[in-house]
Amino acid sequence: MKQSIKSALAISAGMVAVVGAVLTPVGVGAVSSTSNTTVTAQIQPVITISSGPTVNISITPNGTGLASSNSDTVLVSTNRSTGYTLNLKDADATTSLGASITAHTGTVASPTALTTNNTWGFRVDDATAYTGFTAGPTTAETNVAALTSTKWAGITAAGANIKTTSSPGANNSTTVWYAAKVDTTIADGNYSDVVTYTATTN
């Protein structure tokens, strides 16, 4: 019996030891988890344009007609990575200066010399061949017989693109020239028309 009791006690002691091992705290290292977030600044395209406000062309005509020219400066600023396109049109359906000086028959694609009396037109110096205008340079002229060394287009109500760019820029400048040729059948006074420039991001 004693032997049996001792054995039982030994077994009990062993069980206690096992239980003690299970309950002993075990040290645990730090754990972590990660997550990524992409932050995106969405920069929207912007564009601004300014011009004029007036271009004055002074002509003292004679019987056979004389021509003068002067220029306007158009400034465009845009952050558009692909640049902008500049369009020029008449502000309304009437393309004459006053009611007497009609639009030149040349076009942006096929401009011609300004030689016809009582007409007016415009041009830009274009070295890119985007239009039919030559590279120039154009200079202001006063009371000359005709404008034959440069090519001109007539303003239209539908409009035409006169320049395009391929990158952003601030105060990108375009010089637009205007000219008229008149004779003495046109009474003295001011003959005006309003043109509209539109810059559109590409």
Image (tube, grey):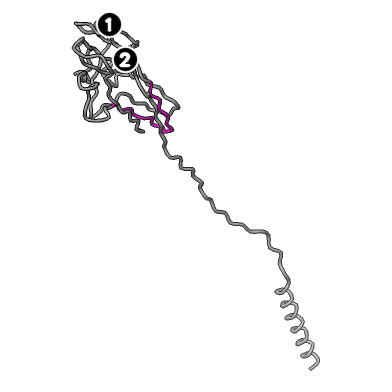
Which residue is outermost to the right? 2
Secondary structure beneath disc 2? Answer: loop
Q: Is residue 55 left or right of residue 121?
A: right
Which percent across, then down, holds residue 134?
29, 14
Asked if residue 95 is positioned above or below residue 24 in the image, the reply reads above
How many numbered tags mark residues here? 2
Foreground label between 1 and 2: 2
Q: Is residue 85 left or right of residue 170?
A: left
Asked if residue 68 is positioned above or below residue 92 in the image, the reply reads above
Which percent across, then down, holds residue 76?
40, 27
In terms of image quadrants, where is residue 61? top left
Residue at image mark 1: 144
Secondary structure beneath disc 1? Answer: loop
Is the residue marked by circle 1 packed among few (<14), some (14-19), or many (20+) residues within 10 Å?
some
Could you tell me the amino acid type at mark 2? Ile
Q: Residue at x 71, y 67 (%)?
A: 26
Which percent across, then down, holds residue 160?
26, 26
The quadrant in which the N terminus is found is bottom right
Magenta segment's dominant SS is: strand
Residue at image mark 2: 57
The quadrant in which the C terminus is found is top left
Disc sitting over residue 108 in the figure: none
Q: Nearer the viewer, residue 116 or 78?
A: 116
Q: Nearer the viewer, residue 11 or 104?
A: 104
Point out the stretch of residues depicted in magenta: 73-88
In terms of image quadrants, where is residue 8? bottom right
Q: Nearer the viewer, residue 83 or 142?
A: 142
In terms of image quadrants, where is residue 162? top left
Asked if residue 15 is positioned above or below residue 187 in the image, the reply reads below
